[in-house]
């Protein structure tokens, strides 16, 4: 894969990723890896420069947008999620997170004057998977490559056969929306129910919408550091794509897609 030295190419890639063309050269190179800080944590931050290669992978076709002003905390979405995906009513296992924010909000009882939920100002902030762009933190942190793209929606989903229950994906998710099935010993993640999210269908207040994908990873705060853990083998694999000179001559790094015209 050739390094991108042409601003027009970068602008086209930015537009295809849903950001429009109003990005600087440095800004888009930073975006293409989603989190320069994550690469820095892997000791790769020095690789970002004018000749760094540009890697674009397919994003999810859609995502779930949540409107906290409409949420009535009925938690029907959590029930619909687990009934469809797990065959049992278990809100604690839901891919959408409501219960943890009902009483105090995201910051818990120590939120002070900004405390949300029923015991604060009443606002319930729904926790939904943001369908992160490449490099997807949970997928990047998985040592077994058990988080893969759903062929129907492009959303990353957990391959239960490959998941070993190490929970590294949970620690890597900045919003804490990766769940874990204690009974099965496997991680669980929102994959948009193959394009028909049951949580959206079940919401009586229309507080959830399924919309075309755009990058919302910069909207709102996070619950933890992105890519807080990563296996050395995965860090080396990232280097093959994101560090100039690592890809074999005349070859694209594995998993890359051409920049859309």
Image: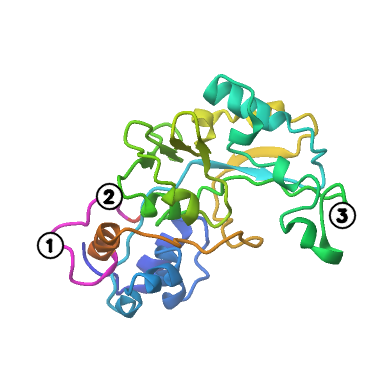
From where the camera sits, is residue 25 visible? Answer: yes
Where is residue 97, by image quadrant? top right
Task: Please indicate, yes or no, whether residue 260 appears anywhere in the rendered image.
Answer: no
Q: Secondary structure at mark 1?
A: loop
Of the numbered discs 3 and 2, the one sitting upstream in the chain is: 3
Q: Nearer the viewer, residue 47 or 108?
A: 108
The segment highlighted magenta reads: 242-258
What label sits on residue 248 in the rendered view?
1
**Nearer the camera: disc 3 or disc 2:** 3
Which of marks 2 and 1 precedes in the sequence? 1
Neighbours of disc 1 within 10 Å: few (<14), some (14-19), many (20+): few
Judging by the rendered image, the residue that carries numbered circle 2 is 255
Q: Nearer the viewer, residue 83 or 198?
A: 83
Q: Residue at x 34, y 76 (%)?
A: 48
Instruction: Tell me how many marks there are.
Output: 3
Q: Is residue 250 magenta?
A: yes
Task: Give percent across and percent down for residue 73.
Answer: 79, 38
């Amino acid at each position: 894969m050739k390094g991108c030295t042409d601003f027009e190419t970068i602008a086209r890639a930015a537009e295809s990723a849903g950001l429009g063309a109003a990005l600087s050269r440095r800004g888009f190179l930073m975006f293409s890896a989603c989190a320069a800080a994550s690469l820095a944590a892997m000791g790769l931050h020095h690789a970002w420069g004018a000749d760094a290669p540009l890697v674009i992978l397919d994003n999810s076709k859609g995502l779930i947008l949540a409107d906290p002003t409409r949420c009535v905390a009925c938690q029907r979405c959590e029930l619909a999620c687990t009934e469809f995906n797990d065959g049992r009513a278990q809100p604690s296992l839901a891919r959408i997170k409501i219960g943890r924010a009902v009483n105090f909000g995201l910051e818990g009882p120590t939120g002070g004057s900004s405390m949300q939920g029923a015991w604060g100002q009443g606002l319930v902030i729904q926790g939904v998977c943001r369908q992160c762009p490449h490099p997807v933190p949970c997928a990047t942190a998985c040592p077994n490559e058990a988080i893969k793209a759903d062929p129907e929606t492009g959303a990353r989903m957990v391959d239960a056969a490959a998941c070993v229950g190490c929970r590294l994906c949970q620690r890597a998710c900045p919003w804490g929306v990766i769940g874990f099935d204690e009974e099965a010993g496997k991680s669980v993640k929102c994959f948009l129910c193959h394009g028909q999210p049951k949580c959206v269908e079940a919401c009586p207040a229309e507080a959830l919408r399924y919309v075309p994908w755009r990058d919302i990873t910069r909207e709102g705060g996070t619950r933890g550091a992105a890519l807080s853990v990563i296996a050395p083998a995965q860090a080396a694999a990232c280097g093959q794509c994101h560090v100039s000179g690592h890809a074999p001559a005349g070859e694209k790094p594995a998993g890359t897609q051409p920049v859309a015209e």
